[in-house]
Image (cartoon, rainbow, N blue to C red):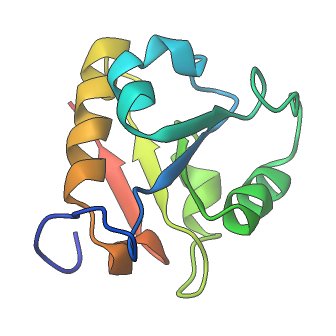
Amino acid sequence: MAGGGRFRPTRRHPKPKVLLDESLPPRRMFPNLNRQFDVKHVASDLGLSGSSDEQVYKLADRESRLLITFNIKDFRSMVGPTKISVIGASTKLKEEDLDKKLVQLLKTITPAELQGNFFNITK
């Protein structure tokens, strides 16, 4: 990860907001993530099932939400210095392990890392 230090939400730096791509399970499957962050799921919360990757990424960018996806290959090329960051998750992780790892990452991410970065979460 670029930068250092722990992310400490303040009035000037709110907690990151999250958008779960359609390929991920609904947000209710991530209780820790839901409890600590503002999480939306592309299909089950926003009704955008079948949207293109570009549409999903533009939505995340417009709403300043970190995008979490299994579809690492297609989203990696969209990340740019003035765009929202993407978290690529391994399909080999169990939902409860992914939940813990996402919370751990989001608690340590710095405000500067919220734009233009690509993170991988693996086993």
Which image quarter: residue 69? top right
Residue furthest to the bottom in view is 81
Residue furthest to the left in view is 5
Which residue shows up at 89% across the image and 31% down it?
Answer: 50
Depth check: give the residue in front, 31 or 123.
31
Left or right position of 34 against 7 = right
Q: Is residue 122 visible?
A: no
> Horizontal and vertical percent for residue 29?
47, 12
Query: Relative to residue 27, is residue 105 depicted above or below?
Result: below
> Horizontal and vertical percent for residue 57?
72, 58
Which image quarter: residue 25? top right
Which image quarter: residue 123? top left
> How many numbered discs sit on the rendered protein?
0
Which residue shows up at 20% across the image and 42% down it?
Answer: 104
> Horizontal and vertical percent for residue 113?
35, 74
Query: Relative to residue 77, is residue 32 depicted above or below?
Result: above
Which residue shows up at 77% across the image and 50% down it?
Answer: 56
Which residue shows up at 22% across the image and 69% down it?
Answer: 1
> Horizontal and vertical percent for residue 65?
59, 56
Left or right position of 86 against 40 = left
